[in-house]
Image (cartoon, rainbow, N blue to C red):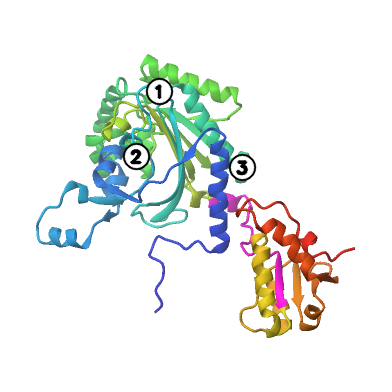
Amino acid sequence: MALQAPEGTKDLLPDEAKFWNTFKQTAADVFGRYGYLPIETPMFEQTELFVRGIGEATDVVSKEMFQAISGENMKKLLAGESIKSKSRLSLRPEGTAGVVRAVVQHDLVPQGAAPVKLMYAGPMFRAERPQKGRYRQFNQVGVECLGAEAPTTDAEVIIMLMRFFTAIGIPAQSMRLLVNSMGCEKCRPAYRELVRAYMEDRRADLCDECMHRAEINPLRAFDCKNPTCSAVMDGAPKITDYLCDDCKEHYSAVKSYLDAASIDYVEDARLVRGLDYYTRTVFEVQVVDGLGSQNAIGGGGRYDKLAEEVGGRPTSGLGFALGYERCVLALQAAGVEFAPAARCDFFLACVDETTRQTAFGLLQMARDAGFIGEMDHQSRSLKSQFKLADKLGARMVVILGPDELAEGKIKVRNMATRREALVDLETAKGVLARFGGQPYGDQSALRLEEVFPVEE
């Protein structure tokens, strides 16, 4: 039996791979307007980074991380030997911890410096049960802003996220923005104890996993998908009733800026997100149709203590991540389809082998001038070459025959109108040569019709 992709992974075939590139470029365009610059971090980090940063009680750390280990260290473990902490590695389950580690390691926010704004895009890994829209290797796009405390930053990041979703084509009416505040180190500890006491009084109605969470971080119980547990937690104390004055003021300001920008939102006191590092503002964007219960397509929040957790100086932080695969499902539910990846400006057809060398050289010139061109490499008949050109969606077919070349001409056919014309070969080469000397990506907007004129 032929080997297949591992369970919980998928291949991005050309049409979707092209859309993934468009997705990332759209993110770079939208986020770039707000001053965000790209960063690339390793796909694996020391396991301790995620334990300290994300939280040992989270499902991500306790259940879902893939360990990465060398063959030599595996032998040591099997032999009952210990390995160094720096050799205990895990594939990244999310992007924030690694970016914050990089910011701390390279001192990207020196004391008193302006905030650093960073964006990333790439694969993450979680050992979850595969299901629709949820893979073990999945793609995320995210941003992190380190060194900014003002509520304007929170509002700006939320607005930027909504702008991105609109830019990729998800209808505004199909999305719902949830916001909440998780308080800070001054007010949250007392609230956690209230929730823990509430859960203890209802131990018989909660699952064992929730009660285990109650010992480490009772707020995790708000994430439980068990319907009975969810109903019990609906009656738990609401964190917004126990915020300190500073957190109340911050949360109120964030909402006022969202109101000023005409951003619709719903306050959800149960929204805690899935990671322990969040403080104050948290938010999540859900789609109304197309994803079932797993309807979140992106979200994030403030994490003002995370830099300290990974060994840095106190540095406020804020960010979000959005799931590419979830967004694709939301787009499909909205009736948006991928544009075909295959695109061909022109096809060079050789009447016989005597014209192939000239065709090959002309093809390279056209590509250097910015066009997408193809030719036959399998000695097909001229009829078969036209079929291939049609399959590739070529707008024009340039036919090189020995008789025409002897006169310094080439025949050009417009595949839409079926009109044909003889074009002077040296003139076409001259036009291509003028534009082909520029760096790739800098070519002028040269039109194919200027090189191979067919219509009068």
- Could you tell me the amino acid type at mark 3? Ala
Q: Can residue 176 be seen in this view?
A: no
Is residue 2 part of the magenta span, yes or no? no
Q: Find the magenta span and give its range.
A: 328-349
Q: Is residue 443 above or below residue 320?
A: below
SS for tag 2?
helix
Q: Which mark is residue 167?
A: 3
Q: Quadrant of the C terminus?
A: bottom right
Residue in view at x 79 percent, y 65 percent: 427
Foreground mark, 1 or 3? Answer: 3
Q: Which amino acid does label 1 sit on?
A: Thr
CB within 8 Å, label 3 to label 2: no
| Side of 106 where 367 appears, left or right | right
Kindly identify which residue carries mark 1. 240
Q: In which quarter of the image is residue 250?
A: top left
Residue at 61% in and 79% down: 377
Q: Name the residue located 87 percent from the left edge and 64 percent from the top edge.
A: 455
> Mark 3 Cα within 10 Å, few/some/many (few <14, many 20+)?
some
Q: How many marks?
A: 3
Estimate how packed mark 2 is, as few (under 14), some (14 to 19) or many (20 or more) residues with alpha carbons within 10 Å: some
Residue 426: x and y in percent read: 77, 68
Sequence-first disc among 1 and 3: 3
Q: Position of residue 165 (x, y in %)?
A: 57, 42
Measure the C-alpha gap from mark 1 to mark 3: 32 Å
Q: In this view, does 361 lie to the left or right of 73?
A: right
For disc 2, the marked residue is 102
